[in-house]
Amino acid sequence: MMALQGCAPSPGNGGIRVGLITPGSIADAAWNSGAYQGLVLIRDSFGLAVSHVEARTPAEQDEALRAYAAQGYDLVFAHGFEFQEAAERVSAQYPGTALIITSGRRVQGNVAPLIFRLEEASYLAGMVAGGLTRTGVLGFVGGIELPPIEAAYQGWVNGAKAVNPEVQSRKIYLNSFDDAAAGREAALALARVGADMFHHNADAAALGVF
């Protein structure tokens, strides 16, 4: 049985409860910690009861979604596209709970995606990098090769090529979001092949990049 951590509703808020499920630690200084900060902001701004639980495996993710829904939570944020299928399985049994999937793929019943166009911001960063590079080589460090991260990388490259068509890019995936030492080694490896502009999407592992 998964234990949900939270607090009681504040007076006057109608007892609305908001849950957050993250696929990793909220101490990662990036993806998960940002989501948790948003949850705290919901609590402090609107006086709502909030709860958070970490669920790394598919079984844990399914269990966490069911636990929140069974307890009557009004709104649950599942922070990652990997929650999509589990949310769709759970949603039919608990139509009173709205399930929001970060980087989700589709709307189905009470399941809806929260979509960030990371590639658009990365495109602008790429334009800057393409204009500033002296070597003509860009370096990218990613945590794990996932569709949103690869899309951000492609946006960065496209932005760079928009201002510097001859620019080249190199990328390294760490297979980790928290190995800062690996991030440092990846950045050094990219520098050795000429990269002088760097972009990352690696959560806490990116602390080693700069």
Image: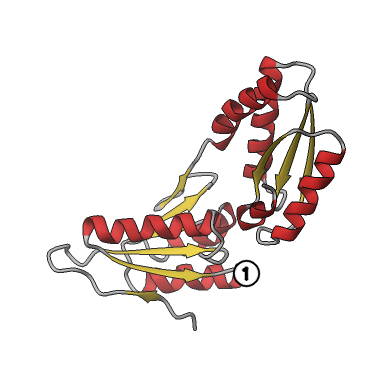
Determine whether, in the image, residue 101 is placed left or right of residue 183: left
Query: Furthest-bottom residue in view?
Result: 1
Q: Mark 1: which amino acid? A: Thr
When the figure is inspected, residue 186 is found, relative to residue 154, above or below; the finding is below
Callout 1 crowding tier (Cα within 10 Å): few <14, some 14–19, many ≥20: few
Q: Measuring from the top left, give residue 30's x and y in whole percent.
A: 54, 54
Determine whether, in the image, residue 198 is placed left or right of residue 62: right
Q: Measuring from the top left, give residue 177's x and y in whole percent.
A: 66, 58
Instruction: Identify the residue at horizontal 60%, vertical 68% (top origin).
Output: 56
Q: Nearer the viewer, residue 182 or 119?
A: 182
Q: How is the image coloured?
A: secondary structure
Dot 1 falls on a residue whose secondary structure is loop
Q: Mark 1 — residue?
A: 57
When the figure is inspected, residue 210 is found, relative to residue 205, above or below; the finding is above
Instruction: Identify the residue at horizontal 50%, vertical 56% (top origin).
Output: 79
When the figure is inspected, residue 187 is found, relative to residue 79, above or below; the finding is above
Q: Measuring from the top left, give residue 193's x and y in whole percent.
A: 87, 36
Determine whether, in the image, residue 158 is placed left or right of residue 38: right
**Count of numbered marks:** 1
Q: Is residue 174 visible?
A: no
Q: Nearer the viewer, residue 55 or 159?
A: 159
